[in-house]
Every structure is written in structure tokens, then in C-alpha cells.
Image (cartoon, grey):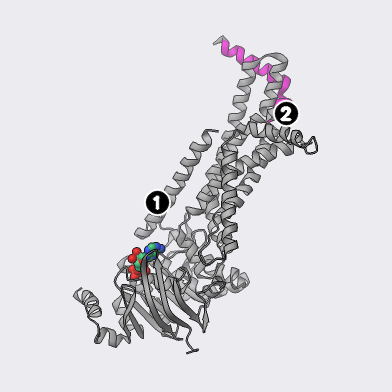
Amino acid sequence: MDKLVKLGQDIIQLWSKYWPMYMNGVKNTLILALVATAIGCVIGLICGILNTIPYTKNDSLPKRFLLKLIRVLVRIYVEVFRGTPMVLQAVFIVYGLPYFTDNALRFNNIWVAAILIVSINTGAYMAESVRGGIISIDPGQTEGAKAIGMTHVQTMTSVILPQALRNIMPQIGNNFIINVKDTSVMFIISFTEFFAAHRYIVGVNNMYFPSATIEMIGYLTMTLIASFLLRLVEKLMDGSDSYELVQADQLTMAAGTYSHPDKGTPFDERSKEYRDRTKLALKNRNGSTRGGR
Amino acid sequence: MSEMILQVNHLSKSFGSHEVLKDIDFTVAPGDVTSIIGASGSGKSTLLRCINLLETPTSGEILYHGENVAGRGVNAAAYRSHVGMVFQSFNLFNNMTVLENCMVGQVKVLKKSKEEARVHAMEYLEKVGMAPYINARPRQISGGQKQRVAIARALAMDPEVLLFDEPTSALDPEMVGEVLNVMQALAQEGMTMLVVTHEMAFARDVSNHVVYMNQGLICEEGTPEDVFGTPQKQETRDFLSRFRRN
Ligand SMILES: Nc1ncnc2c1ncn2[C@@H]1O[C@H](COP(=O)(O)OP(=O)(O)O)[C@@H](O)[C@H]1O
Ligand SMILES: [Mg+2]
């Protein structure tokens, strides 16, 4: 019991002395995670889209070759960055670049280096998620779009990607949360995020455990808030479960909100189940792969 | 011959070594309502999908106003905007409302303004009786309603021909009628239609041309009176007798 009291006192002591440093770390961690997740999603989106451009035997040889090449390059990118620790990638880019170019190329801004590394990593994970999100949209909708003359790009931007994005929202959130935590390895390139603050502070006063407790609480608070916000966004994206019936001429249905909670055809059931199933599968797969990072 | 909208010559399609369509010839003239009947697996869907270039024919030509669209270097998207298709499984866009489903093609493909597209979409949604539901999403309406929206979506593109692939096969029996009524109304207005169907009453009473397909071949074709009244081939008689019994 007095141990807990002692811990409480130490935490208060540390916090009152160093809170600007901790808070600065929180700020840097959040900015880095947010920016890198956003850029990473864009990278993932581009890779996922490039990776799913369809081609048929009727396409010209150069086009088919180019698309094949793109797929191979994306594959290599994903495997390399998913298969190596981010902390080593950071070392490679920040210290390797000047080493190989005799200081001609180097990162003068540590922010640029950190954002670059985390973005590229996130992109590698998101590429697979986006690809999964795209191929989980039932091909019928693609055919429906083709049948009214929409091009591949139009089909993607108007029909497939909005739905794929909704389906991969859990993974985007997942990646953000992982980035909040995993940016802690960026101390290796002297980036002053939340964990670096801890390393500095305990280096000065040796209060390891109280400071680590502050870190734990800090990280948990950040990720919990992120989880909560993510749920909110998903809810908003799903839209309303009911719709307004537009009163036309002699139609006698009651005005106002009218919804079919479970009316439908066997087909409805199937497609809903299908969607839920793919969503779940995507979630599980991502959870297990990234959990290992 | 040039007044034909579509002219299919020696069309063949194989999936691997499986020859699904064998040397198909037929034509679609303006105002034709052609029903394609035949057993499951006889290649009816594949034929429609080839005509709409959703499948690439293995050989043969598909002439659209005399121009072959089955070769390389054809702008498939532009061609498809003239040849609408209605699917068995509706294939509505789940991220859009009923109204948006009927507008997106007009805006993106035909480059109409949103307002123009909305007015035009409403016209057809009213025609298929779905105007009250414009704000609903596909998951919120019944199968018959979905199919009527899908028809309105295709019509809103002002296609020259509409292809239907078993438009009522995925529907509960009580919803089949509402979709067939819409199709019959379209036929009476002179819409050119190519309909794969198991609804023999529709084929007999609404269409002016019936094609019976068997194992990738056009086995018999003619007016409904000929094909249903005096079928020439034994296969056709066998196929039709299966429907008479029930
Ligand atoms: N994408 C495909 N790959 C391989 N075989 C196919 C494909 N699509 C259709 N088939 C085969 O082609 C034959 C005809 O199919 P289909 O045109 O759907 O017939 P129908 O519509 O008359 O029932 C079937 O034997 C089917 O298995
Ligand atoms: Mg079929």
C-alpha cells in the first residue's frame, strides 16, 4: 500500500517538474503518428489500386507487361518493409544514406526522416489492406458500373473505393494506434517523441519506474481516445439505418421515417453476411500480422 | 443490313477447353424484343456478357451499327454506355442511394450536369414506380424494388438496347410480377430488348422473337408462335414440355 502511495508521490513529483517535456513528447508522437498514418494510407491506396488494375488477353503487350511489373514492384516493397524492423529501417535511412553518399545525401530535418520511415511502413501494411478491401467488394458492382459505361477509374473512385475505405477503416485505426506506440523506436534517430522524453528524464534522475508508469498511462490514454474517435467515424460513415419516403402522388405509406429492419430477400441476407464476413476476415488477418511488429 | 443495331457473326467463346458458345449468329433490329430461352448452362448468360463485352469472345465478330466491337483497341466503356444491362443479382451500388445509382452514370459517363441527371433519373424512377424511394439505400429495399431501380439505372443512360440476364430469377415469387410489368411496358414503348428468361409467358406474350439455345448453339429461333406453337426440333419440344407440366 505505501509502495503505491510512494509511486503516486513520485509520479506527481516527476510530472510537476517535467510535464512540459512529457507533453511535448505526446505532441510530437501524435503529430508523427497522424501525419505518417495519413501519408501511409495514401501510399497504401495507390499501391492497392495499382495492384488491382485488371487486364485481359485483349490488352496490348506493353500494358500487360507494365501492370505485371507494377505488381512485382509493389510486392517487393510490401515484403521488404513488412519483413524488417522499423528501427533498423530508420538506422539504414538516416545513417546509411550519408555513409553511402559521402554525406552528399542526408536528412537535415529529423521530422522528415521520421515521417518518411513511418509512412513507408504504414504504406506497406495498408497496401495489403487496401487490396483486400477492394477485392472484398463483390464483383457484381464492378460489372454494374461497367455495364453503364463507366471506366475502371470511374468505377474505382465512385463505387469501389468508397466502400473499400469504409471496410478498411478498422485497419486505418489499427495502424494509427500501432504508429502511436511504435514511433517510440524513433529515439534511435534522436526524434523527441513521448518515449524519448522518458529516456531523457530517467537519464537525469533515475526514477525509472514512476516515469514508465507515466508513459504507460500516457500511451493508453492516447490509444483509447483514438479507438473511441475511430468508432465514431465508422458510425458516421455507415449513415442512417432509415430513410425518408418521398411522398409521391397517391402513395399511401405513412409519412416520415420508414425502415425495413429485416425485410428483404434471401439475397439481402447473403450479401450482408458476405460483407460482415469479409470485414471480420480482414480485421483478423491484419490484427495478427501487425500485432507481431 | 446496316439498319441492324447488333449483328453477331460466328461468335465463339471458350473457357479453357470448354467451348461454351459455338458459332453463334443472330441480329437485333430496332424495336426487337428477343427472348433467349434454354436450359441452365446452355450459354445464355455468356452470350449476353459477350455482347456487352463483359467477356471477351474467343472468335467471331459483334457488329454494332456495322462496326466490330469485339476486336482489340475498342473503347468498351463508350460502347457499353449504348448497350445497357440488367443483371440477375441487380448489382446496385451499395454506397449510393436509389437516386444516386441512377445519376452516377449520366454524370460520369455522359457528362451531364447533376441537375439534368437528377431530372432524367426521376423520370425513369417514376416509370418503374420507385420515385418514393429515391433516398433509400439498396440494402433497405426489397429484391423486386432493387431490380426496378436497376432497370431505371440502365434506362437513364438512354441505351439503344437493353440486355436482361434472368432479371426475375433471384426474386421471391410475389415480386416477379412487378418487374415483368415494367419490362412489358418498356417493350410496348418500343424499347429494343434482349431478354434471357425462364418466364415462358413473358417470352410467348411479350417478345416478337424467341431464341432457343442448347449446349452453346442456337437450336431454334423464330416468332413466339413458331417456337412455342410448332417447334421444329425435338430438343425444343423436350425443353418446352418441361414447362407445360407445371
Ligand atoms: N467465367 C467462367 N469460367 C469458366 N466457365 C464458365 C464461366 N462462365 C460460364 N462458364 C460455363 O459456361 C457454361 C455456360 O454458362 P452460362 O452462360 O452461365 O449458362 P446459362 O446462363 O445458360 O445458364 C456453363 O457450363 C458454365 O459452367
Ligand atoms: Mg445464366
Secondary structure, mark 1, is helix
Image position of A246 with respect to A31: above or below = below
Q: Nearer the viewer, residue A278 or B100?
A: A278
First in sequence: mark 2 vs mark 1: 2
Q: Look at the numbered disc 2 and give the secondary structure of its residue.
A: loop
**Crowdedness of circle 2 by 10 Å Cα count: few (<14), some, many (20+)?**
few
Which amino acid, mark 1? Answer: Glu
Residue at 49% in and 81% down:
B63
Q: Mark 1 — residue?
A: A273
Give the CA distance from mark 2 to mark 1.
48 Å
Magenta residues, dominant SS class: helix
Displayed-image quarter of ligand 1 = bottom left
Please give the residue where the numbered disc 2 appears in the rendered image. A190
Magenta part of the protein: which range? Answer: A3-25
The quarter of the picture where residue A61 lies is bottom right
**Residue at 73% in and 28% down:** A190
Image location of residue A87, percent across then percent down: 64, 31
Left or right: B157 with respect to A107?
A: left
Q: Report which quarter residue A180 is drawn in.
A: top right
Q: Chain of mark 2?
A: A
In this orientation, does residue A143 appear? yes
- Output the chain of dot 1: A
Q: Is residue A248 left or right of residue B230?
A: right
Residue A11 belongs to magenta span: yes
Image depth: mark 2 or mark 1 in front:
2
User: In this rendering, is residue A121 above or below B65?
Assistant: above
Q: For mark 1, does the 10 Å Cα neighbourhood hold few (<14), some (14 to 19), or many (20 or more) residues?
A: few
The magenta stretch spans residue B193: no
Residue type for callout 2? Ser
